[in-house]
Image (cartoon, rainbow, N blue to C red):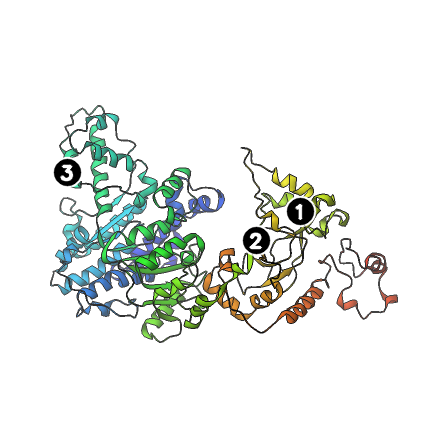
Amino acid sequence: MQHLINDIDEVDFDVTRGGQVEIIGWLYQYYNTEPHDYAVNITGGAVTKNEIPAATQLFTTDWVVRYMVDNSLGKYWLERHPNSDLKSNLDYLLPGEIQTVDSSENLEDMRLIDNAMGSGHILVYAFDVFMKMYAEQGYSSRDAALSIVQNNLYGLEIDKRAYQLAYFALMMKARQYNRRALQPEKVKLNVHVFEDTDTVSPEFLDALSGEYADDIKQIIELFSNAGELGSIIKFDKTFNWTKLRENVEDMHTDALDIFGMNQSKKIVLKVLTIGEIMSTKYDVAVTNPPYLNKFDPDMKKYVKKNYADYSGDLFSVFIFNNINLVKIGGYAAYMTPFVWMFIKTYEKLRSYLVANKEISSLIQMEYSAFEEATVPINTFVLKNVPNGSNGTYIKLSAFKGGMNVQRDKVLEAIANPDIDYLYRTNQANFKKIPGSPIAYWASKNLIHDFEVGKRMENIVVPKVGLQTGDNKIFLRFWYEVGNQNICYSANTISESTLSGKRWFPYNKGGSYRKWFGNYDYVVNWQDNGKMIKEFTWENGNARSVVRNPRFYFQESITWSDITSGDFSARYRIPGSIFDVVGKSAFKLEKQTDLLSLLGLLNAKVTNYIFKILNPTIHLQTGNFANFPVINSKISVYKQVQVAIEITQNDWNSFEESWDFIRHPLLSHIADDNLSIWYYSVVLTNRGAKNVPIFRLWGVK
């Protein structure tokens, strides 16, 4: 409370400046910080039903809200009112063509929904934009305020506290212009919180009768887990909501209400209201949806059944749902993690959007700009029409410093559309790249390369490998075990079995390094991995996953799973097992030239292309497989051989290498001046795998 009083500027609470709404939202998010950390970071498993509100409650930064609403609701209005002065009030409207649409739609009939509204920040700003529209149409501010909250704005939420804050914020906005707003009998807001229907009494269900009884029971069943599913509840048919409501309202209940009929009736009427809101088509949908992929069994089953192609995360379900929640020509705006733009999990979502909808605009933020989320963020607007024009894209990846820096760069791009990080492109180009990544900055020449080039997976075989189940048990640094127990020369699994050795070289990726290196680990693969294969959970299910064993011990090109900087690839000599983060590619045919491919992979252009295929820090085997290779008459085989030899000598110059012979700083010291330790340990082991070597330069 002391920080609330002393650290926040008084003007931020000024109703006329709008800051108070943002403060309410931030306060509620930080109120949830401890339960959020517990649900997301500590449990590690599926997020339970009661934890979902805390785990998914992220307040939307003010300028992002303004971008989303300006480029959806604002643009929708300008298309239908090309002479409107509203444009001058939309500070975050991105440059781009605004197509005129003939429409006779009344302002009172325009609907905007936020179906994961949180504490109401989006709805409150949308209220302000609607107020400007009503003013243009000649309404008084008193009448406009009441019309907006009763006709134009809709909101849904699973978190009761957040819903109460949203309700309060909207009432205060309306009260700012009309004192009657605080009279419940005169003002009815269209914001609601989901509640389960499992408290509806059996007697109420038995009392249902008539033509619509089965439909009402079906709705009650659909909402039995509404507190968890919320806005992703799917209706399999069209309901006559008016008739359903009349049927319930006409049900007789007595004064004593022994069986809870009145309470059940109240719950069902509320559910019918929410159901009608969910099944209505809107002009605009704007939301910051929940980010969640650790589903409990009930939600996982529901999502897989109803949204199989978009089940990678709750936010991807919302992306699909909301663009189909709006009318043809309507807009849906979002703030989500930007992984949907690139990684394979969301390929079906991308393909669907690129083929059927239009990406109107998109802002891709710097990887760690939004500190409140542990994922990189983008914000974008879709239009519910087939692709017909170029979209506007802003790439902020190069600008570090948080959300304020991102905001300033967006405003710079709006003021100067010729700036080099603003792009205008047609999304049809995305289909020309395997996996349809939203690679809006790809040049025409590069897109052509994807069209004519040979995919990498047709030249080599990219694979992920062993997952031990517990690396602490099965992995060691090579110098932690005796050399006599390490098999350095197995070329096949059968040879490893016959060797009688326990430990084998293990490719676990490692730090940035090109050409050669990162030979750090050994894995317990005794008796063909018997202990690993038999490693189970308490319920008897396997903890380990032995993937692609036929490629174990083969020579390969390898790269690390995490590529936060530039991409780097290395040659791996035969004799190693590889794992899920030491990703590897193997010869497809005997004549495959791995070294020439390695030269291509370590070129500058390769890093640029991989950042198009997937700019996240995890380069997947699917991204590697999609790399375009164009045949060249220029041979780099010898140059790559030299590069490997140089980096191999460098790797072996340090004690961490099992082929270490002499540190380069000692190469010019006369033998009679070397330490006793050096004579006894190193020189006697030349040409053999060395025993563990420790830093004892001071010992003589």
Question: Decide: marks 1, 2 in contact (CB < 8 A)?
Answer: no
In the rendered view, does 61 fall on the left or right side of 488? Answer: left
Front residue of 564/685: it is 685
Q: Could you tell me which secondary element the residue under label 2 belongs to?
A: loop
Of callouts 3 and 2, the N-terminal one: 3
In the rendered view, does 550 fall on the left or right side of 190? Answer: right
Question: Decide: marks 3, 1 in contact (CB < 8 A)?
Answer: no
What's the amino acid at mark 3?
Lys
Q: Could you tell me which secondary element the residue under label 3 belongs to?
A: helix
The residue located at (35%, 49%) in the rendering is 317
Using a 10 Å C-alpha cutoff, classify the residue at mark 1 as few (fewer than 14 neighbours), some (14 to 19) or many (20 or more): many
Q: CA distance from mark 3 to mark 1?
A: 70 Å
Of callouts 3 and 1, the N-terminal one: 3
In the rendered view of the protein, which quadrant contains the C terminus? bottom right
The residue located at (20%, 41%) in the rendering is 239
| Residue 243's disc number | 3
What's the amino acid at mark 2?
Val
What's the amino acid at mark 1?
Ile
Q: Could you tell me which secondary element the residue under label 1 belongs to?
A: helix
| Residue 493's disc number | 1
Q: Is residue 121 above or below residue 203?
A: below
Which residue in the structure is indicated by mark 2?
581
Front residue of 254/483: it is 483
Image x and y of residue 120, in percent: 28, 52
